[in-house]
Amino acid sequence: MEKPTTTEALVREILDRIADKWTLVVIEELGSGGEMRFTELRDRIGGVSQKMLTKTLRQMERDGLATRHVHAVVPPRVDYKLTPLGESLGEAACGIWLWAEKHLGDVTSARQAFDRRPK
Amino acid sequence: MEKPTTTEALVREILDRIADKWTLVVIEELGSGGEMRFTELRDRIGGVSQKMLTKTLRQMERDGLATRHVHAVVPPRVDYKLTPLGESLGEAACGIWLWAEKHLGDVTSARQAFDRRPK
C-alpha cells in the first residue's frame, strides 16, 4: 500500500535531519558516554567545529532527541544527554554503523574499481 | 576499546555519504521495485531533481551500491538495480525508516514545544 504523501514527505524530512553524520556521531557519543559537557563531547568527537556541534545539538534539542541542562554554577556548566527518544534513534541507527564498519573495505574497493574504469 | 582513528574517520565518511536522504530513498525504491529505468525511479521518488538523482545514482554506483546497465537499443535504455552490497545497506537502514515513521509525531510535538519556549 502506498503511504500517504504527507507522511512520506515528513518521514523524508526527518530522515534528512537525523540521517546526518554529526547527529549520528553525537547520538553514539552521548549513548555510550552518558550525560556530558559540551567541551567533553567536542573533544570526544574530534574534527567537528564548535559552530557545527552547537547547531547539531540545538537541532537535536528541538527534535526532542537530547536535553540541555544549564547548571547554576560559576563558570556556567552546560550538560547534554539523550532523551529516551534519542536513545531509541541510537538503537535504530546502530544497523547503519555496523554496516559501515563491516563494509568499509567493500566500499573502498568499489570506489577504486570505479575510478580505474575507462571514462 | 577505542576504534583506530582511521577506521573511525572512514566510517564517518561513509556515513556521510550513505546517511543521505536521497541515497536512502533510492535504496528503498530499488529495493522494493527491483531493476528500473532512470525515469521510472524519478517518477516513483517524486520531488527529486534530475540532477540530484543523477548525482546520487553515480555516487551509489561508485560506492558499489548500485549497478547501471545501458541496453543497446534505440533510444538507449538505462536501468539501475541494487547490488548485494546495496541490498545489505537497505536492510541495515530499515531501522532508521521504521524509527522515522514511528516517531514522526514525537518529533513534531517536540519541535512545537521547543518553538513555543520563551527565547
Image: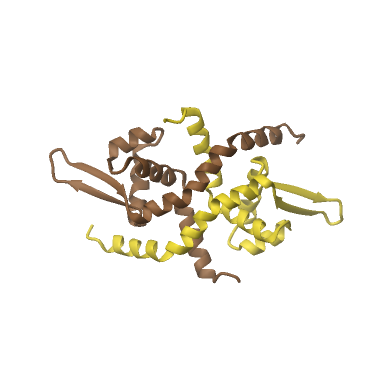
Chain colours: A yellow, B brown
- Quarter of the N terminus of chain A within the rendering: top left
On the question of residue A23 being in view, the answer is no
Percent coordinates x, y for residue A10 in the rendering: 53, 34
Query: Which sits in the foreground, A41 or A31?
Result: A31
What residue is drawn where x is 51% and y is 31%? A7
On the question of residue B16 being in view, the answer is yes
Query: Which sits in the foreground, A18 or A78?
Result: A18
What residue is drawn where x is 70% and y is 36%? B114
Q: Residue furthest right?
A: A73
> In the rendered view, would you say A50 is above or below B54?
below
Along the horizontal axis of the image, is A108 left or right of A9? Answer: left
Query: Which sits in the foreground, A100 or A1?
Result: A1
Percent coordinates x, y for residue A118 in the rendering: 22, 60
Percent coordinates x, y for residue A34 in the rendering: 71, 58
What residue is drawn where x is 86% and y is 51%? A72
- Residue B34, picture quadrant: top left
